[in-house]
Image (cartoon, rainbow, N blue to C red):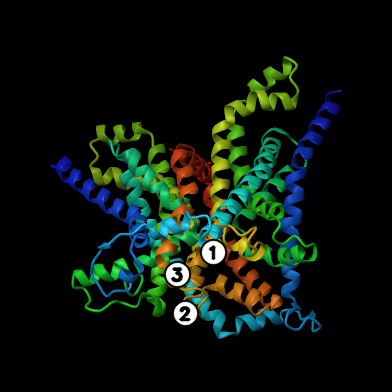
Amino acid sequence: MVHMKKRSEGALGIALLLPIITIMVILVYYPIIKTFSYSMQKMKLTAPQDTGFVGWANYRSVLTSDSFWYSFQNTMFLLAVVVVLTTVFGVCVALMLNVDTKLSGVLMAAAVLPWALPPVVNGIIWRFIFHPGYGFMNKLLIVFGVTDKPIEWMSSRFLLLFVVALVVAWRSIPFSAIVCLSGLRAIPQELYEAAKIDGAGRWTVFRYITAPLVRPFVGIGITAASISAVNIFDEIVALSGYSDLGKNLLIESYLTTFSFLDFGKGSALTYIIMLISAVLGFFYLRSLGKEVEY
Amino acid sequence: MNTKRGKLLYTVVVIVFLIFTVGPFVWAFFVSITPEFEMFKNTMNMFPTEPTWTNYVTLFTDSARQSKILFQGMANSLKAVGLTLLIGIPVALMSAYSLSRFQFRGKRVIKNAILITMVIPVFATVIPLYRIFVAYELLDKMFWLSLVYASSFLPMSIWLMSNYFTTIPVEIEEAARVDGCGRIRTFFAIILPVAYPVVISSALIMFLSAWNQFQIPLILASSFQTKPVSIVTSEFMVKDSIQYGITAAAGLIAIVPPAAAALIFRKYLVSGMTRGSTK
């Protein structure tokens, strides 16, 4: 009797999962496998008759093209700058939000705002700031005498990438800050009180209590920022279009697939990007699983 | 000594923070009220000398081309968001409840298989999806677009919800069931009233993610009747390349719904974000 009940319970449990399993299989798992099979085929929509299995040829052709390595460098540059900016300013904002004042509510509201913004609109808004002619940044730099003629932000490779990284960091900082803040808030007050009784100085308290206990949360922020940095797309399109100068791997894959209509090579590129994301994702899921002991 | 210096430091940090966070919106607003001729003048004026509301008037004039495009885009985005929530929230609730309350073989595998997709980039699935959509003539169909949205936002919601459900003591449920409540009734009568904050956070995160989508609709929804406001605004940038003022105005209008939702429900947004990231 008990046994039967248990079995029907399990059946209900699986039944409740049927919708999500169906959705995941059809819209995520099947396509992922399909993408892999495309990446092993010659498949250009410009030559629909000329198809067939080519093995790793698409991967070889991707990995030996200058265009790929150019985009790869750009992706890595963006990754590094976004992670550094997001982490440094995320921690600063978290420390600021942790101070309890009359302003706290307003500051929290302001911090949430960039996060809610569509990335593409984010890019557009910053384009006005970094516009070579009437942009705010140029006016500011000229007024303060830093430069005497407008800087062409969008026509130099690393200047453009830096602007993209800045804009993406701006959108990623709130998440990083709020996660870090929840880490700060989770530290039991008793620890601070105990340290005070023991006569520990401010630096000692920070070094031995705050920093180690907040580190896992900063880790979550870093991994989340690196995943969004590898997947930058909208901001680049908004800031510089699909131009070659600022393209990263995602733009490269989009152009290969939907502009040059080479689905085989595009799929191979996508798989390479997925591999990079998977490595970062592994650290993400692992950092989430970490328990903090107080 | 510390308090005085600390106060000063705090004030400086707050000011810098506010300039950086709110500043870009303010500047976009100035661009949107700057007349075209003044924008290209080689002037060092920070602010327009002759502000004009023309761009907003155009965007709110029914007969204007830009107005039609923008508001169709807003309507499309709202429809996609609505459908995504209608599909996403019930499915997330069912899945999360099952994963947090039932015991059966293969549960761990299923849970991990769902959660791992959180880190898979959109482009890994969109190429075959595009071909499927072409083959079955699903391109530019709002329902199928929303289903794809839901598939990419569901893992996060399921994770948030099942973490929350496991914190609700099983005993209160068992008590209700001893009193003769069925599983389904227990869920609606006991679990849902307790778990509503996580439902609101999940709905909010889904709303924002769906509203902000760009890559998926770029490939799967390019027609006037389906393309969301994010695509429309970016097209203002490309197609109406000279008209920066109207692009700025359109961009600012497009962020009103997500910004309002995020500000009104920010308590739930913050708790959802932190729960989602820190268990």
Amino acid identity at mark 1: Asn
Q: Is residue B210 left or right of residue A29?
A: left
Q: Position of residue A284 (x, y in %)?
A: 54, 54
State the mark number for residue A231. Answer: 1
Reading the chain from its start, which is encountered first: label 2 or label 3? 3
Q: Which residue in the protein does label 2 denote?
A: A245
Q: Is residue A288 left or right of residue B182?
A: left
Q: Quadrant of the C terminus of chain A?
A: top left
**Is circle 3 on the same chain as circle 1?**
yes
Reading the chain from its start, which is encountered first: label 2 or label 1? 1
From mark 2 to mark 3, how far is it between C-alphas?
A: 11 Å
Front residue of B185 and A203: B185
Amino acid identity at mark 3: Leu
Q: Which residue in the protein does label 3 denote?
A: A239
Q: Position of residue B233 (x, y in %)?
A: 50, 62
Q: Residues within 10 Å of mark 1 (few under 14, many from 20)?
A: many
From where the camera sits, is residue A50 visible?
A: yes
Q: Chain of mark 2?
A: A
Dot 2: what SS?
loop
Front residue of B209 and A212: B209
Dot 1: what SS?
loop
State the mark number for residue B180. Answer: none
Pointers 3 and 1 in contact (C-beta within 8 Å): no
From mark 2 to mark 1, how far is it between C-alphas?
A: 17 Å
Q: Is residue B17 left or right of residue A219?
A: left
From mark 3 to mark 1, how far is it between C-alphas?
A: 16 Å
Front residue of A205 and B70: B70
**Is circle 2 on the same chain as circle 1?**
yes
Amino acid identity at mark 2: Leu
Numbered label tally? 3
Residue at far top of view = B179
Residue A264, quarter of picture: bottom right
